[in-house]
Amino acid sequence: MMIICREQLDHALAGMPWPARRWQTAAWADFNCASGQVREALRHLPDKIYTNLGDLIDTIAAIEQRAEAFNVPSVDN
């Protein structure tokens, strides 16, 4: 299971103007030299407008919970 901590996202998305679409968060993380794990997680988020970092974190948590509930391997497996 891919686990992304808030500190990683804080670094990757520091200075991000919100709201933002998925592709914008991924591009911002690239600009901030985020880890490959964080960039991969952002690229696999649903394509929607995220209102703030908390909204994005909630989405990642929901995806991870669903994957765990259905015993689906995450992207990094």
Image: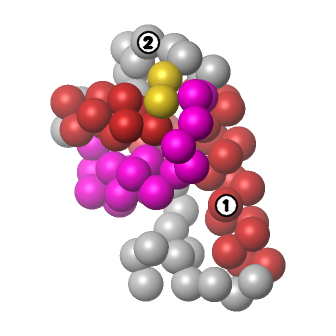
58 drawn magenta: no
Magenta segment:
34-50
Q: Which dot marks residue 3? A: none
Quadrant location of the C terminus? bottom left
37 sits left or right of 6 in the view: left
Query: Which residue is depicted at the point 73% across and 56% down?
Result: 62
Q: Amino acid at mark 1?
A: Ile
Q: Which dot marks residue 17? A: 2
Query: Which residue is depicted at the point 68% across and 74% down?
Result: 67
- Location of mark 1 (residue): 63
The colour scheme of the drawn protein is: secondary structure
- Determine crowd level at label 2: few under 14, some 14-19, many 20+ residues with C-alpha closer than 10 A: few
- Determine crowd level at label 1: few under 14, some 14-19, many 20+ residues with C-alpha closer than 10 A: some
Query: Which residue is depicted at the point 44% across and 12% down?
Result: 17
Considering every residue shown, the one lying at the far front of the view is 47
- Secondary element under disc 1, as helix, strand or loop, is helix
Residue 64 to residue 33: above or below: below
Q: Amino acid at mark 2?
A: Pro
- First-in-chain label (1 vs 2): 2
Query: Which residue is depicted at the point 66% across and 65% down?
Result: 64
Query: Could you say where residue 32 lies in the image, as x and y percent from the top left?
Result: 24, 30
Measure the C-alpha gap from mark 1 to mark 2: 23 Å
Front one among 6 and 29: 29
Query: Could you say where residue 10 lies in the image, as x and y percent from the top left?
Result: 46, 30
39 sits left or right of 68 in the view: left
Residue 9 to residue 21: above or below: below
66 sits left or right of 40 in the view: right
